[in-house]
């Protein structure tokens, strides 16, 4: 069975190609976060065949250059080794010392920012199945690039956190609202709908459980209080008899014995005329005090 992360990436990989500026932004996101750079080649590596094909198609469309896909150790490899294209990409990404950075000058428009982030997620993102946990993360070897990504996400209104995991730097978000916004922003609409359905179902279940637990707690409280009331009433009946009680106390005593499961509010509605919860409590406390006196 496919993971939620893979299903989401496959959805994005088959999105209809957008305007040239957005296609270039997505391609740059893929290269920045899935590429390794040297003076004579650029190597793109991914474990997802759909992402490899997406990159191949975008690159061919924008640069009129076909890159074959090879397979090495369960990874899909694309190598760009044409010097003039390498120089052009190095210029686009402002690569210094074989280290890329986020090309902000090409990300002025919201649509391009969205496309770049989509490429970034395809290259390095992981999203957990929301039925298990809410977690979206980017796992990167380059700490400087991770900090760069964190700043980019913050500029878009997201609030990611950062941590170290062995040799990797991880940028992550655990808020279901923030993850929903992210999926919508990169146009993963099917994934967003699935994620939202799970969130709604979880919240419904949690609310139901809280309500059930509250009902059980309230029932327990009623049972304890009712037992105390009935014990006092029975003691009072044995010692002086309920007939000796004032009318309002006698009425509430019989109602409590006949309805041990009812709350004070519900007992009050049975009185003639009906009285408040406070009124019922006051009368029952009187009965308990009289029973204690014997």
Image (spheres, rainbow, N blue to C red):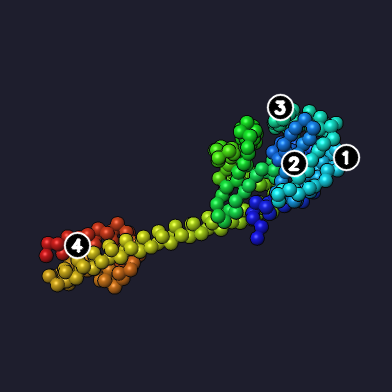
As rendered, which of 130 and 144 lies closer to the eye?
A: 144
Mark 4 or mark 2: which comes first in sequence?
2
Mark 4 or mark 3: which comes first in sequence?
3
- How many neighbours does mark 2 have within 10 angstroms: few (below 14), some (14-19), or many (20 or more)? many
Question: How far apart are the alpha carbons under marks 4 and 2?
Answer: 81 Å
Question: How far apart are the alpha carbons under marks 1 and 2?
Answer: 17 Å
Q: Which residue is mark 4?
A: 288
| Residue under the point 63% across and 34% down | 142
Where residue 230 appears, as percent x and y from the top left, is: 23, 68
| Residue under the point 55% across and 52% down | 133
- Nearer the observer: mark 3 or 1; the answer is 3
Q: Is residue 166 above or below residue 275?
A: above
Where residue 231 appears, as percent x and y from the top left, is: 21, 68
Cβ atoms at labels 4 and 1 below 8 Å apart: no
Q: Which residue is mark 1?
A: 64
Where residue 194 appears, as percent x and y from the top left, is: 64, 55
Mark 1 or mark 2: which comes first in sequence?
2
Q: Which residue is mark 2?
A: 44
Q: Secondary structure at mark 1?
A: loop
């Amino acid at each position: 069975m496919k993971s939620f992360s893979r299903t989401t990436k496959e959805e994005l990989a088959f999105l209809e190609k957008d305007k040239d500026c957005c296609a270039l932004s997505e391609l740059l996101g893929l290269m920045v976060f899935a590429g390794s750079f040297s003076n004579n080649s650029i190597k793109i590596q991914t474990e997802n065949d759909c992402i490899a094909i997406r990159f191949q198609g975008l690159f061919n469309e924008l640069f009129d250059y076909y890159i074959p896909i090879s397979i090495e150790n369960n990874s899909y490899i694309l190598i760009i080794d044409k010097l003039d294209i390498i120089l052009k990409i190095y210029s686009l990404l402002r690569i210094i010392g074989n280290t890329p950075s986020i090309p902000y000058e090409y990300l002025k428009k919201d649509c391009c920012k969205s496309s770049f982030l989509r490429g970034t997620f395809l290259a390095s993102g992981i999203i957990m199945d929301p039925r298990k946990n809410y977690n979206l993360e980017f796992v990167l070897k380059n700490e400087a690039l991770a900090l760069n990504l964190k700043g980019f996400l913050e500029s878009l209104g997201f609030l990611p956190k950062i941590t170290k995991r062995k040799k990797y730097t991880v940028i992550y978000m655990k808020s279901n609202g923030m993850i929903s916004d992210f999926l919508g922003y990169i146009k993963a609409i099917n994934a967003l709908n699935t994620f939202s359905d799970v969130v709604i179902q979880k919240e419904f279940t949690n609310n139901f459980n809280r309500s059930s637990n509250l009902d059980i707690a309230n029932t327990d409280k009623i049972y304890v209080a009712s037992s105390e009331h009935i014990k006092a009433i029975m003691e009072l009946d044995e010692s002086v008899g309920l007939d000796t009680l004032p009318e309002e106390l006698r009425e509430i005593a019989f109602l409590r014995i006949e309805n041990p499961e009812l709350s004070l509010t519900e007992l009050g509605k049975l009185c003639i005329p009906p009285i408040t919860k406070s009124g019922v409590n006051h009368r029952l406390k009187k009965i308990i005090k009289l029973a204690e006196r014997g």
